[in-house]
Image: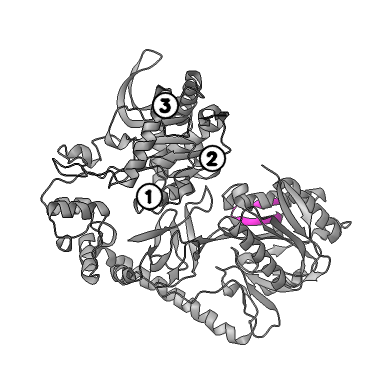
Amino acid sequence: MVNRTAIIKQPDNISFFNDVYKLQKEYQEALILDNSNPDFIWIGEHQLCYTLGRGSNYDNLLFSLNDDNHDVFKIDRGGEVTCHMPGQLVTYMVLDLKNFKKDLNWYLRKIEETIIKILGTFNIDCHSREGFTGVWIGNKKIASIGIGCKRWITINGFSINIDCELENFNKIVPCGIENCLMANMIDYNKNLNIQEVKRIVKKTIQEEFNFDFVSK
Amino acid sequence: MSHEIFMPALSSTMTEGKIVEWLKNPGDKVERGESVLVVESDKADMDVESFQDGYLAAVLMPAGSTAPVGETIGLIVENEDEVASVQEQNKGNQPAVSSSSDQLELVSNKAEEKPVAHSEIIEKQEKVVVLKSEKAAPSFNSEQINAATSNVSSRVIASPRAKKLASQMGVDLAKVNGSGPHGRIQADDILKANGQPVSVPWIGEGGSPVSIPGANLGIESKPETAGNSFGNPGETVQFNTLQKAVNKNMESSLDVPCFRVGYSINTDKLDNFYKKVKQNGVTMTALLVKAVAKTLKKHPQVNSSFSEKGISYPENINIAVAVAMEDGGLITPVLKEPCNTDLFELSREWKDLVKRSRSKQLEPDEYSTGTFTLSNLGMFGVDRFDAILPPGTGAILAIASSKPTVVANSDGSISVKKIMQVNLTADHRVIYGADGASFLKDLASLIENEPETLVS
């Protein structure tokens, strides 16, 4: 695998979902137009919001769209509804799979492996489950994955619960799985903090995908 | 003419995909490269783009439905006036499409809730419509459909060769029923209308070189087929542009000191594997291309070519495959980097290339960037042939038919195996006999022992 230049952005403040989504789209469009443009990685946190894939079932939103004051976004990714909030680390990867493998299943499994390595760094034992994309600790879900793709240029990525209010997941059926229990990394390793995890996420992605990072 | 949109392979292990959403309605204009629909497999979804400018004529599988990889799920036509005829033909099979949701929708306000619910109802209705139309489908036969099409459209759609034959034979195109897609008149239809035996189209597409010749090929069961001719007896017909280009390339090969080396490959395992993956849209051409590309990766010398400066090693492995054009000449569409593309995607790319070759819609880099060429005449049942080396490349592989053959095994026993002869023509300035021979040995070993590794 050849080293690829990727622009990395990792803001410390909470980012509004819509802004980051637009940014991803811009990088995706640029790569579609010219594949010599850089890949793009974003690692950060969002305000509380709910996102749906293009094929998502609205029944998995347990609140009424007009009662609650939550932000709900329908975006270009596969999978069912999920939830983002402060304390959860979100990673987006806009990359050209033509430089890796034109295989979305390979990409999903590669992301799972990457997350398992990240958690392994913090001595947290976790695993993937066949048929249930994501990363699990026992029967609890610690990380969720959802990606979109256009001309093999990916968008979106994965989120890892670090230390967030898991009650927010009670308002939805996460990933469309009934009675799905969620977990936080902090419950398995008291000594970690989100900045530390962010550093490891960056390092692991760099190694797994052979990136030369350029900060922006 | 219409172009099919296929269910793409999002991964090498995917056998079917779910249509999440159609981004275009039937009748909408689409540009080459524009997203037409969204397909989902697991947690990943993918925009499926149009391969050409035109109009979405028909949605054959509605949003929410699942289709096997390679299945035709929609049709695109080049001209707006063809939409009506295609729609007529697919009547009852086209669900209404809920309005496309553009990139991002903020649905947190009240007003948005109803349309969401509404679109779900539409989706449910669509499913009902499709179920009904599936039941109704068998009552249509292709002749009725084609007849209906030609009634609706006053324009006569015919292949270039059909037009030429019609004018040579004095056949009135308006009176011919086309047997091609959407009533397109093919050369065979003209022959039929003129009471002549029908020839088998000789396209080097390689549906199945390893099938038993005679068992399922029209060419064997109709021994008195008409051969190809571009003119009438006594005439001299000018070369067309493509024929001239081929002539130039063939003549330049006379300056190249070529040698040939052949090999007999047992295809029993390959045939069995092909039977399994065929239903997922895999073509024999894609299988052979994949096998050759994987073997070339181990034998870079056979992928090299002569240049004034020395032996030139291309950065990529791009396999060109010769396709005969029905109105003369041939073209070599290129499958780029087959090693990096899974078999299903490769098959889809190949079908698209062949389709666009026939309608002469290939971009230059789609037929001129081959680093190694395949020529397959297996579908004609030939037992062996040798190919002429295209300029700028070092080698070309001629693939003959796979035939049941009595084989003496190393232990002295005798058995019947399917044997396919291949013959490599190479430029001896860059590729030597031993290079060619060891390449063929590894190619044979891959095809004979582990054809299932050709998947990715």
**C-alpha span from label 2 to label 1:** 23 Å
Disc with the residue nearer the chain's start (1 vs 3): 3
Q: Which residues are magenta?
A: A127-136
Residue A42, labelled with which disc? none
Q: Residue at x 72, y 46 (%)?
A: A208
Q: Residue B375 is drawn in which quadrant?
A: top left
**Mark 2 highlights which residue?**
B339
* Residue B254 appears in the rendering: yes
Give coordinates of residue B292: x percent, y percent.
Answer: 47, 34
Disc 1 marks a residue whose amino acid type is Ser
Disc 3 marks a residue whose amino acid type is Asp
Q: For the residues carrying marks 2 and 1, which lies nearer the camera in this image?
A: 1
Between B422 and A164, the one lying in front of the other is B422
**Mark 1 highlights which residue?**
B357
Q: Residue at x 69, y 77 (%)?
A: A71
Task: Give the dominant element type of the magenta stretch: helix, strand or loop.
Answer: strand
Q: On screen, A38 above or below B250?
A: below
Q: Residue at x 75, y 72 (%)?
A: A167
Q: Secondary structure at mark 1?
A: helix
Disc 2 marks a residue whose amino acid type is Cys
Give coordinates of residue B380: x percent, y percent.
Answer: 27, 36
**Mark 3 highlights which residue?**
B255
Give coordinates of residue B164: x percent, y percent.
Answer: 21, 52
Disc with the residue nearer the chain's start (2 vs 3): 3
